[in-house]
């Protein structure tokens, strides 16, 4: 009998409670792997987009020029990550400039706007990670419950037999231990992925915090120099022609 048939046989011969435990763990494992693939792809894309933003705009201190590039592209894609933080800060900066607020008030307002946008972006990055944490922490205990229940049922069945032998005990115990194995199979990948993704989110969050401080420093310099325009320039006049053809900036 092959491995697959043996596993199926163990499942079919198990008690209803152990079968339910196995089904729960199987569903948890499927959900876990789905979240792992989805979150892994999303976080890789977020890192790539941040790096692209940094590469395109790291060498310029002209906030109006950067805003023109972000908002006036031939091929528009939704802004996210650092680009959204920049947009939130720049719009608030223009608003305070039009109001004629002091530099300190303007910088304080811009900092709050970027912090709010940063929190929203971090919430997006952390989405579904709690699922991995829950599966990773509870699956071993669910599997252990199935094991304990299966062994208990096996010994209860043996109580009706005058003489118990190893061939009589082994199948029931094997069926019960499958639940523990399935619990570990669901929990280990979930915990590894959760720790890795959490570390990635923390690193991106640190990069966002550094970007926020850099933006505030540039904004303060431009406010002091009076170089922040009250109106956002039109695309084809404000954007560097060499950069206007770029297809993706965020």
Image (cartoon, rainbow, N blue to C red):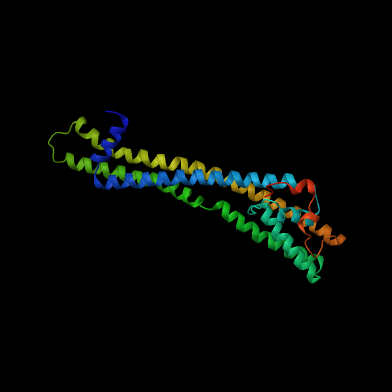
Describe residue 156's horizontal placement relative to residue 53 as left or right: left
Name which residue lies at 50% across and 41% down. 192
Q: In the image as oriented, which residue stretches furthest toward the right?
A: 225
Can you tell which quarter of the image residue 226 is in?
Answer: bottom right
Q: Residue furthest top?
A: 1
Q: Position of residue 149 (x, y in %)?
A: 27, 45
Left or right, 22 with reference to 243? left
Q: Residue at x 73, y 65 (%)?
A: 109
Question: Residue 8: horizontal and vertical position, in percent?
Answer: 28, 37
Residue 108's spot in the image, x, y percent? 74, 64
Q: Is residue 169 left or right of residue 205?
A: left
Dividing the picture into quadrants, the one containing residue 227 is bottom right
Q: Nearer the viewer, residue 55 or 72?
A: 72
The N terminus sits in image quarter: top left
| Residue 55 placement (x, y as % from top left) | 73, 44
* Number of marks present in the image shown: 0
Q: Is residue 117 visible?
A: yes
Q: Residue furthest left?
A: 162
Quadrant of residue 200 within the rendered picture: top right
Residue 57 visible, this orientation: no
Judge by depth and name the residue closer to the eye, 118 or 162. 118
Report the front residue among 105 and 96: 96
| Above/below status of 197 relative to 228 | above
Q: Which residue lies at the image location 79% right of the left edge and 57% below the top edge? A: 64
Tell me which residue sits at (31%, 38%) in the image: 177
- Left of 130 or right of it: where is 105? right
């Amino acid at each position: 009998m092959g491995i697959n048939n043996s596993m199926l046989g163990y499942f079919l011969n198990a008690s209803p409670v152990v079968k339910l435990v196995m089904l729960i763990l199987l569903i948890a494992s499927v959900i876990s792997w789905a979240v792992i693939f989805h979150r892994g792809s999303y976080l890789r894309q977020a890192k790539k987009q941040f790096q692209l933003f940094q590469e395109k705009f790291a060498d310029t201190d002209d906030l109006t020029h950067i805003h023109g590039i972000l908002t006036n592209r031939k091929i528009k894609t939704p802004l996210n990550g650092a680009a959204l933080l920049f947009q939130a800060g720049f719009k608030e900066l223009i608003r305070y400039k039009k109001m004629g607020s002091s530099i300190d008030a303007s910088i304080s307002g811009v900092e709050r706007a970027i912090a709010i946008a940063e929190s929203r972006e971090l919430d997006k990055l952390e989405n579904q990670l709690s699922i991995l944490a829950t599966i990773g922490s509870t699956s071993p205990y669910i599997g252990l419950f199935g094991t304990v229940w299966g062994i208990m049922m096996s010994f209860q069945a043996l109580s009706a037999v005058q003489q118990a032998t190893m061939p009589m005990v082994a199948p029931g115990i094997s069926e019960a231990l499958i639940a523990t194995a399935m619990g570990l199979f669901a929990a280990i990948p979930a915990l590894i992925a959760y720790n890795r993704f959490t570390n990635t989110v923390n690193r991106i969050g640190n990069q966002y915090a550094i970007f926020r401080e850099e933006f505030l420093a540039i904004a303060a310099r431009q406010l002091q120099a009076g170089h922040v325009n009250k109106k956002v320039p039109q695309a084809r006049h404000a954007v560097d022609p060499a950069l206007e053809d770029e297809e993706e900036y965020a």
